[in-house]
Image (cartoon, helix red, strand yellow):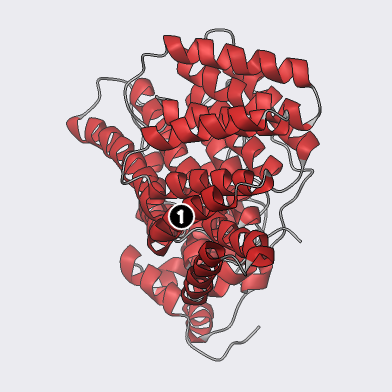
Amino acid sequence: MARDHPNQSLSALLAESGWSAAELARAVNTLAGKQGVTLRYDRTSVAHWLSGSRPRSPVPDLVAAAFSNRTGRPVTAGETGLERPAAVPFTRIEPGDADAVLRLVALLRADVDPAHHAGLAAAAYQQAVAPQPVWRPASFTVPAARGPARITERAEVRTLEEMSVLFAGLADRHGGAHARSALALYLADDVGRVLSRQAPSAVRRQLLSGTAQLVHVLAVMTADAGYASLSQHYFHAALALAHDAGDRDVYSITLRAMSVQALRLGFRAQALRLVEEAMNAAGPDMEPATQAFLLNQRALARAHHRQDRAARADLEAAQAQHALATGPPGPFTMYTSAGLHYQAARTLLVLGRTHEAIHGWEISLLERTPDQRRTSALTLAALADTELGIGHLEAACQHWSTFLDLYPYLHSVRARQALVSLRRGLRIHHRHPQAAATLERARAALAVSSTRPVRNRPANP
């Protein structure tokens, strides 16, 4: 099918590869022949593609494969410019998928491409989606090399670790929508290059695990930007990479994050199932910090199912395991006391223990550092809503006021939802001077935030 402008993407790939049009045509013909397809393309065929025509399937995939072989990096059919955006499907990446890395690169590049991003961002969260298998150690999709790790390989492992800490910190300082596309672009540029090379087995596991962690962080940021379906894609990709790495901790932590998202969107049964799968995947030898992290989420999921006794038992077990945790600082190695108290307070509230929940959130808030604006703001919002619910209007207004001090720094759909909740809860108290002043600040903040690149609500209808 013809289009109105030259194929600049294909032209750039030809330049990168150093191929002439005739050489590309021969490479495509050769690949097709190996797959039982007879093609007789020549340089004039490639000239037509460069001018804007698009060949039928499976030619775009063959062109992408030819460039992948030539450049030594994954090239997707969408990157060749030979497919229409609507013809590029994005199915879930599952643990054990042999082409998980290639499909992740395609997803990342679509995410950072405005022509494709809109469709990805507009999709709805799928309640029934579940990873398969839950846990089964797999062989690597790229053969591991023998021998000791090179300095550059060790440096790449360290870089991935640093990037996880950096972007997780940015998300907590400014919200998930801040720098989200920068992380997607970083991964799109680097993940294929890093994971397509051979490396010693131990290094390869570390590279896969480090990439899984970064993709997990991207999934969390994407959810906080309001793109629930797209974040699902990234969570599944993180599972696939952690599965190939044999990393039970990252795998189970990602399932736990998926449970959090499902519960937040109102899918309680799915949330409980996911966190149960996380517990099973983590295995009997999980670190105390990981066990506390999982137990605290299962307590909340069980409380929402009115399994009060089981929820309380999980809370007590989480606290006991947290006391034993000795892991180093990091988003995948340490469960902070502030996080423990925040999550436990949510469970206590569902269990009807309101004053204990308020106390837990107060402790959590005291243990937050000044740069943890997002989590501090969400804790303040929870406190304000709960205080208002038991008739403590002035206390609620004080918490909302501090929340509004932090809000201008945040690009977060959850923070915006909290702001909307603020206005809704205080509207009936508009004659109260403190409430009226808080409402006016909220109105001004909401007007300013309407121009930010954050969805007004999660992408679930």
Residue 402, relative to residue 123: is it above or below?
above
Q: Please state the total of marks drawn on the protein image.
A: 1
Looking at the figure, which quarter contains the C terminus? Answer: bottom right
Residue 294, relative to residue 424: is it above or below?
above
Instruction: Please report the residue visible at 62 percent of the width from the left and 69 percent of the height from the top.
Output: 431
Nearest to the observer: residue 281 or residue 139: 281
Q: Which residue bears the numbered disc 1?
A: 403
Q: Residue furthest bottom?
A: 4
Q: Can residue 14 be seen from the camera position used here?
A: yes
Q: Can residue 132 be seen from the camera position used here?
A: no
Q: Is residue 261 left or right of residue 448?
A: right
Looking at the figure, which quarter contains the N terminus? Answer: bottom right
Q: Position of residue 391 (x, y in %)?
A: 66, 47
Q: Position of residue 252 (x, y in %)?
A: 57, 26
Nearest to the observer: residue 136 or residue 458: 458
Could you say which quadrant of the image residue 305 lies in?
top right
Instruction: Please report the residue visible at 33 percent of the width from the left and 26 percent of the height from the top.
Output: 203
Binning the other alpha carbons within 10 Å of mark 1 as few (below 14), some (14 to 19) or many (20 upward) gives many
Could you say which quadrant of the image residue 162 lies in?
top left
Q: Residue furthest front?
A: 432
Q: Position of residue 131 (x, y in %)?
A: 69, 35
Nearest to the observer: residue 225 or residue 438: 438
Disc 1 element: helix
Q: Residue furthest left?
A: 151
| Residue type, label 1 | Phe
Instruction: Please report the residue visible at 18 percent of the width from the left and 31 percent of the height from the top.
Output: 151
